[in-house]
Amino acid sequence: MINVGILGATGAVGQRFVQMLAGHPWFSLQVLTASERSAGKRYADIVNWRLDVPFPEEIGDLTVSPTTVDAVKECDLVFSALPADVARGIEEEAAAAGVGVCSNASSHRMDPDVPLVIPEVNPDHLGLIDLQHERGRDGFIVTNPNCSTIMLTLALEPLRTFGFSSVQVATLQAISGAGFRGVAGMEIYDNVVPYIGGEEEKMATEPRKIMGSLNGSEIEPAPFTVSACCNRVPVIDGHTLSVWVDIDRPIDEVKEAFRSYAAPFSGLPTQPERSVEYLEQPDRPQPRLDRNRGNGMTVSVGRLREGLRFTALGHNTIRGAAGASVLNAELIYKKKYL
Ligand SMILES: NC(=O)C1=CN([C@@H]2O[C@H](COP(=O)(O)OP(=O)(O)OC[C@H]3O[C@@H](n4cnc5c(N)ncnc54)[C@H](OP(=O)(O)O)[C@@H]3O)[C@@H](O)[C@H]2O)C=CC1
Ligand SMILES: N[C@@H](CC(=O)OP(=O)(O)O)C(=O)O
């Protein structure tokens, strides 16, 4: 078993990590960290468990540690669910101390030697771990993308073969994306907020890195543009995206590309049966009905029509965050970087 820890284990994403790592066949959860407010207390006593699944009692007795390199230096791997400003330094320190870091935070996503990975899309970018080692890092940092970026990029992957140069997207993002203390009820109830700080910029840059080509030690960004409009809506979990892409092919051909898409690997415990699933019903996908497809790891696609337009949807704290990171870690383990 690989000994793992979670940085920021009490938050919206941290709790999803606990859910996904409790009973994991390869990873043994040993360390949970949070802020000074929570450190030194029993996890079961301090966590305000807000997930719609039972609390994994076997994890409850772990004592929450402060978020320091000392707390995690005996781990082989840590999953980071820290706010980006807190994550930057501690992730670097942990990687320097020989720990593998799989991070959800945005701090290192665009670092040239840090892979920004969706296993189905760019598993080869993990080769940058070797570059990090050559540059003197004993451990490594691997990141997963922004939650909306993951839904968009996974939905575009089956269409890669057609080629495209321009993507437009409008998002309807769940409130869990802002963390537990992120959006006040008075702001979001009976409302839509047409602004999520930094999100549109991330959606413009991250997909190009992910779908880019690794040439030696550099990633050449993919040659398309993304124009995004991001909106917060009163949904608890599940980001919905309306996507336009400049592909001029018969609808049936494009639909077949979605239907026949299969991940380029198999055998990872968190991998869903279908990474992308096309839904035929005219009013799907919907967050309440489709976010848990594939245990929250499937991106549902539907409403494909002339334009070329379609709708994509995925669970933002599972496929868009903790599940994405755990799947990355499983691929890293399978490729023997751990
Ligand atoms: N929510 C989502 O859908 C997604 C989130 N992310 C990213 O994941 C990260 C976590 O997000 P989320 O779970 O929503 O955030 P939350 O605010 O819900 O949780 C933050 C966690 O970090 C801890 N923390 C906060 N400040 C400090 C500090 N100064 N030192 C140590 N620990 C600290 C908190 O501990 P305590 O409880 O003690 O305060 C808590 O465990 C962020 O970088 C976010 O951008 C990425 C993709 C999607
Ligand atoms: N911004 C996303 C969640 C998030 O934290 O993204 P990032 O990891 O890129 O900061 C949302 O609000 O839904």
Image (cartoon, grey):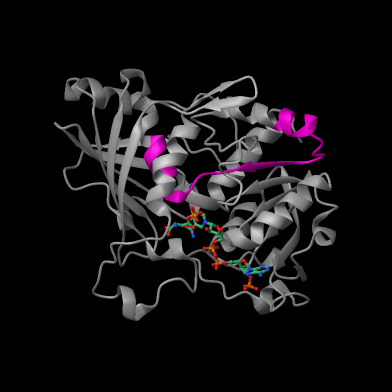
Residue found farthest to the left: 306
Q: Quadrant of ligand 1?
A: bottom right
45 vs 115: above or below: below
Query: Which sits in the foreground, 105 or 253?
Result: 105
Q: Residue sitting at 17 percent across and 20 percent down?
A: 250
Tell me the quarter of the image containing the N terminus. Answer: top right
Range of the magenta residues? 129-154
Can you see residue 266? no
Q: Was residue 131 drawn as part of the magenta stretch in this picture?
A: yes
In front of the other: 268 or 169:
169
Is any part of residue 257 visible from this angle? yes
- Quadrant in the rendering for residue 167: top left
Quadrant (top left/top right/bottom left/bottom right) for the C terminus: top right
Q: Residue at x 44, y 43 (%)?
A: 150
Q: Is residue 39 above or below residue 96?
A: below
Image position, residue 295 (x, y; %):
47, 48
Q: Position of residue 266 (x, y in %)?
A: 56, 28
State the count of labels.
0
Specify whether 43 is left or right of 117.
right
Q: Residue at x 59, y 58 (%)?
A: 84
The image shows residue 184 at horizontal and vertical percentages of 39, 77
Residue 77 painted magenta: no
Name the residue: 51% across, 63% down: 53
Task: From the top left corner, tell me how far across and down residue 279 is, in percent.
Answer: 26, 39
Position of 326 with respect to 260 (left or right) is right
